[in-house]
Each structure stands twice: as structure tokens, then as C-alpha cells.
Image: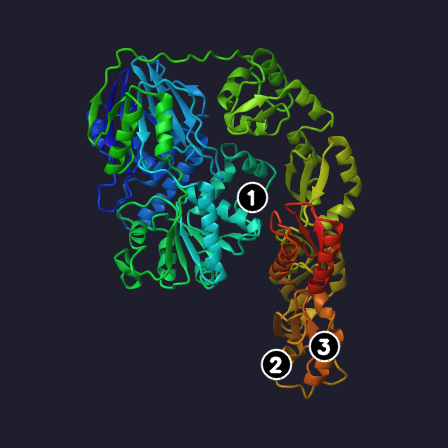
Amino acid sequence: MKVIFSGGANEVGASCYLINLEGKNILLDCGIRMSSTKDNLPDFRLIQEHGGVDAIIVSHAHLDHAGTLPIISRMYPRAKIYMTHATKDLTRVLLYDSLKIMERESEIPIYAENHVKDMLDRILCYTPGYTFTPFSDSQIKVTLYPAGHILGAASVYITSEEGSVFYSGDFSGFRQNTIEGAFIPKLRPDVAIFESTYGDKLHANRELEETRLIEKVSSIISEGGKVIIPAFALGRAQEIILILKKAINKGLLKTKVYVDGMVREVCRVYKLNPNYLRQNLAKKIFNGNDIFFDDNIIEVEKPEMREEIIKESCVIISSSGMITGGPSQWYVEKLAQDEKNLIAITGYQDEESPGRQLLDIIEESTENRKIKIDDKEILINASIDKFGLSAHADMGEILALASSLYPKKIFLVHGDPEIINFLGKEIQKDLKSEIYIPSNGDIYEIDIKNPRKQIEKQPYPSMNQNCALTQENIKDLWQFIVEKIGVKQALSLEEIAQIWGKGVDTENLKELLNNTIYFEPDKKRMFLYYAVTENELKNLQKDEVMELNQMLSLADEYFGPESGLYKKGARFEEKIALLYFNFPDVARERYSEKFKEFEEKTGWKIELNKNINISAINSILSKILPKEILIKKVSYMNMGKKVIVKIEGKINDLDLVKDKFYSETGLTLLIANDKEGIQNEKKEIIMANSNFEDRMEQNKALKIIDEEFSKLPHKIYKKSIKTSSDGYKYIELSFISKVVGEKYTELIKKLSEKTGWPIGISDSCNQFEIINIVKNLFEEKGILLKKNPSIYMDNMIVKIITSSPIEKETLEEINEKLYYLTGFKVEML
């Protein structure tokens, strides 16, 4: 056996370790250095001099482990690349982002887009726990094990006739908000390579650090400040989003959280890989829910949004985590000079990064607190704080894993030199293993005279089927596994495919297993599956519920394209079919009998979407409006169920068009053009008995209205000057809702007489303020809401979920106050 260190030794970055076993060269990771003052690349010449690469195994997608894959793959195109499914999805995102950065910074690129595409085509993905053989002419076997750290991260175990090697990659034993911790069984390696990033430290209690973060953010927000959290786009950012989201939903934090940079794209990949997430998140995704974004956690979709965002007190999560690039640089430059603001550091900082500079000046006096970003000197008046949210193992976890595996030889890598030396001495206190602290360029010849015996896993019996596995025949597979293998064995996708026979695509198999009653994912390793017991199956079948995919397919038969059904989903555990129609009110009335028939036939209860599909309005308009009419603008007013269409031209038979539109959509159509305003609009405008010729000057009239309402419990949120369909100007007042405004009809009449202005009440509704009032009313009663309230404008209802039961009298009292303040009432979900 030979071990060659081409990068990642005595440093954090450019992880790249070449293992020679049985004449085969296996490369463990191929990363990049993030430092601007050092060579970015591993020592590829060292790899060339020792025979090149026959296979590449990647532990996870962070660029310090996967950033130079396109280069090494181009050099050795016959070498297959092995990783988990989630790691491949994330590697694609990170490498394409790197291409953009290289192009934007006008650097000579270290690889091109075609190199990335070719490299991705050479990847083979395997589920953690499944043992595969990378070479047909060798006894070498490889198994990936869940490493924690980030989505899809894996430790690597290689066995051969020359001995066995364990490579930890970056790992973490504790369970994070997004993923479970490492799951590494009692293996028997001869040689082990351990990461040492925090090998001299014991991490702070994670829950206490999360609480400290929330308390600090809340304190900054309450004083009107802003919080910028530079975060690694992959892993750390997702953790922070969920920490803040949980605090907001519990009522511990009141703020908007904006998510910027590559973080958004990584969140999308997380949602595409639910089986690699914690069970609670996977179930939300299976039920069609977003696990990251909602009304309070908002994506920054365009750079132009940033200037508006920094005007308000809020939290911003942005890449990059070390402030070496990405939008976090822009935010830090903009926010650093205001002492009310906070820069929160949550992860590892390279010694040359702006993030490390920030940590170095925490204790400095204000006049000395300066850092450099791209040769610009930035004065830092904002608070700086560090929070221990690391996703790397600490000294205790590394020692525990080393003791569990007890390898004969241990190599310590991926850490600063002084930390690795400290960790090596600590391991020597506990184990008699030989400890090595390699440097880049070092080569070790290892002769394992008596390789440790490995536990041989017997292959499972096969059904040898040649047909596709479907919902119709999956019961046969379940029956075979129950009888031949048992219900206590967790099986990977690859193992289940092999048990069935030939031609099973593991990606399709995953969808099949996630949506069947015959198998269930392991609670902590949801990429593995158990066959359910016969008793569990009987309980599930008592309901006589149709299979999920069969039910969704039947929905298409029942409700064709003409129905406006544009999306389907399900809440599997509740057996609720989620049907999304363009115009749900019309569908509810038109298909009421079909809905009953569908429910009886499938055993699934139908739940319709609440809101209309705005994009469908245009297609209806193009169908019913005369061809010569040019549509200039379409506006939808939810509260009044109205659609205002600004056109060029005039419609003669407007009533007929409006009737057709209402029949198709259930909405009132208002047509407007530049010359005549809205045709046939019946706007309720309060007018005094006057011809309005002697109306008061505009600003004076608005001031009188303000003075009158300043004495009253309901305020006016907005005042506008509008033009009616008859061509006269009037004042429009916007209240928290139209219902509240109508309470002041008599007062508004008097104000109309006093000012000489016609006055109208807006149909608009201040949803943000209503949500705040609902939250405050429940907080006053000591009741926490599980999630943000949902507003349904059509029936003036706010739906909520409480974290504990609520008494009927309390709910009635809250509803009475809420109706008085807003015109809305609360319903429990």
C-alpha cells in the first residue's frame, strides 16, 4: 500500500490523497485552495509521477474537496468518479458557480464549461451503506458511510487484499437542523486518514449557541439595526435559515430574513434530495411544502433588491462565508460603519480572509477596527460576534471515532499545523496506533503484514425479474423481502434493485419507495428502506386507499386540461389529495359531483388550493377579448375578486365579455383605457351634497383628514389622489381593510363636505399589519403560533396553528378584538 499526499496535509484546502492498492491508484478528493496568495491546485505532477488515477472518490461537494475535479478528470478521462447522489447535485452547482466567478473576475480559468460537463458524465452515484467494486479485475471494495457535515457528505471505507483504509472526509457526529450526524459502524481499518480542523477544541453546546445567536439578533433588530451573516452557501447557510425560521415561528424573533447569493440555488438542491435530510424536513417536502422560504424568509432574486433591503431593519444571510467574494462583501461594505448593525461570523475563517480579519479586531478600539476587502480599507463600527455553529468534528468526536475504529496507522490532515500536532499527542495518550503528521509531497510505503479481517456481507437473494418495478407489482417485491430477508434489514436502493432483478433505475425506484405503503425509510438514514411488517400493512390497508401514483394518474383522467388543473400533490399520511385549479371557486362549483365520486373511488379526501393561478388570467383574456384589442396591463385585486385590464381600443359588447370572463374565472372584469378610465366601474365614492367646484387645496384637505383620524383607534395607512371613470378627481383612503374603513362612512361624508373633495375607500388590505396584530393578540394570551398566520382575503379569514390547545372563550375574545381592529376573524387549522 502506498499513500501520497498531494494537498490538504498541514493545511485546510486542496484535499487530495492518492492511495495505491493492488496496483490501482484511487484518488480521495481533489479540492482547491481558497487562498489568494498560494497556488490554488494540488500537486498534480506528484500524481502523474506515480502512475496517474484509476478511480476518484469524493467525500463531499465543498470546493476544498471537489474544486479541481474537472482538471484531474480531463487528465484521466477513463477514471470513474464515485460519490453520493446529493454530492453530485451540489458539485454541479458549485462548479458552475466557479465558472461564473472566473469569468467575472477576468482570470485565466483553470477549467472550462466542457470540462465540467465531461466530468459530470463520468460520475457514478451510490447510496451510503452500499458496497461497490470500482474495478472488475480487483478485489477492492468501497463503501460510503454518512459523515454528517453537509448534505450527502460521506466517509470512505476501502478494503483490499493489501489492507483496508478509512478516510473520514469532513465529518460531524452531532445532529444538525438539516441532516443527521455521522453514522459509521464498527469497521476494521488498517489505515485511517482523519480530518483535524478543530482537533484542539471542544465545541460549545450547539443549542446554547443557537439561542445566543437568536438573542443577539433580536437585540440588534429591536434597536432598528441590521444583521449580516456571511455564510457558506453550502451547509452553514441552510442551518442558519432553519435556526432563524424556527425562532420566528415561535415568536422569539420578529424580522424579515433575506437570503442572497448562491445560497438560494443550494437550498433548491437540498429540496431535491429529501432522503438525505432529517425525517421532519423530508416529510415536509413529500407533502409539497417549502422547508426554507416563506413570508419571512425571502429570496433576493435580483441584485437591484439589495439597495431597498438595507434600508430596513432585517437579517441578511449571504455567501461567501469568509467574505472572500459574493454579495456578502457588498453588504459588509454597506453596513459595517453603522454601530447599530451586527456582523455575525458562524464558521471557519481562512487566515488570509476578510472574515479572519474581523475576528482579529473584535477586541480592538473603534478607531483601529479596519479590514481590507479587495484592497479597499473598510472602517468597522458595527458589532462583530462569533457563533459556534461548526459542522466539523471537535477533538472529542475525533478521539471517539479513532478509538472506535482503532486503526494500526493514523494520518492526520485537514487542519492547521499546530492543531494537528496537538491532536496527535492527544490520540497517543489513548491509542497505541502509529500517528503520522504528513506534509504535502510526502509519500508513505505501508506494508500491512497481517491485514485485519473484514466482516463479509453475504449477497441478498434475487427475484431475477426482467420487467419494470411499478406500483402494480411492488407488493410482490415486498412479499419476497419479508419471506427471504426479513423486515429488520435496512436496504439501499441498489440492494433493492438487485433483489428485484434487471433494469431498475435507482432514481425512479426512490420515488416509488417514497410513495408506497409497502416500504418505509429508516428514520435517521432515510436513503435506506425497510419492508413494513404485515400488521402495519394491514392497518394501512384497512382504509382501502388507492396507491398514491395511481390516485394522481386518475386525477388527470377525471379533470382534463379544460378543467384548469395545473398541479397535483398529496399529504400522504393524512391521505389528502391536493388539487390546484386555475380558478378554484369555479372548479368547486363545476365539479362538485366529480369530486365526491373521486373521493369515493380513491379513498383520498380532496383539498383545493385557496388562491387563483394569476398566470391563467391572461390566457382567458386572450380567448374572450376581440383580436383587435391590445392588452397593455393586467392587475388582479384579490380582496374584491376583480381583474382590471388596461387596453388600447374599445369593447362594444362589454357586458357579454364580462359575463364570459366571470363564467370562466369567477372574477369581475373591469376594462380601462387611457381616454375613458375604467368602463362600467361602479366605484363607491362618498360625495357630499356639493358640486365640488370650491374644493380645498389638495395638501390642506389631506392634512384635515389626518388630523381627524389621529384621534381615532383606526389609522389611515395611505392617501391617494385618484381619477374616477367619470373623469373627476377624488381622494382614496386606505385602511387596514375596507371593512374597517366603512365603519367611518358618516365621518368621511362630513370630511367630504368640509374639504369639497369626493372621498373613496380603497379595496386594498394591509396583510403585513394584520399578521402582526394576530401574533400580538395571541402573545398577550401567552399562546405561541407554530407558523406565520395565513390570510384568505376572499372570506376575510386568518388561519393559524397554535403550539398548544386554546380554550374556546379565549379564541372568542381574540376574535372579537381582531374583528374590531381589522375586520378579519381567526380560524384554527
Helix, strand or loop at label 1? It is loop
Residue carrying label 3: 748
Question: Considering the numbered disc 2 on the image, is that residue within a helix, a strand or a loop?
Answer: helix
Circle 1: residue type: Asp
Q: Is residue 765 left or right of residue 317?
A: right
Q: 249 or 273: which is nearer to us?
A: 249
For disc 1, the neighbor class at 10 Å (few under 14, some 14 to 19, many from 20) is: some
Residue found at the very far front of the displayed protein? 429
Left or right: 461, with 202 as reference point = right
- Give the CA distance from mark 2 to mark 1: 45 Å
Q: Which x, y percent locates residue 388?
A: 40, 44
To which quarter of the image does residue 752 belong?
bottom right
Name the spot of residue 659 as percent of width and height, x first. 76, 58
Q: Which amino acid type is shown beneath numbered disc 2?
A: Lys
Q: Residue at x 34, y 21 (%)?
A: 406
Evaluate if marks 3 and 2 touch, with contact meaning CB atoms under 8 Å apart. no
Residue on which disc 1 sits: 290
Q: Position of residue 477 (x, y in %)?
A: 60, 17
Secondary structure category for the residue under label 3? helix
Q: Residue furthest bottom?
A: 694
Q: Name the residue: 72% across, 83% down.
A: 753
Say which of 689 and 591 sits in front. Answer: 689
Mark drawn on residue 703: 2
Disc 3 packing (10 Å; few <14; some 14–19; many ≥20): many
Separation of marks 1 and 3 at Cα, in angstroms? 44 Å
In the image, which disc is placed on residue 482? none
Amino acid tagged 3: Ile
Q: Please tell me which of labels 1 and 3 falls first in the chain.
A: 1
Q: How many marks?
A: 3
Left or right, residue 353 beside residue 682: left
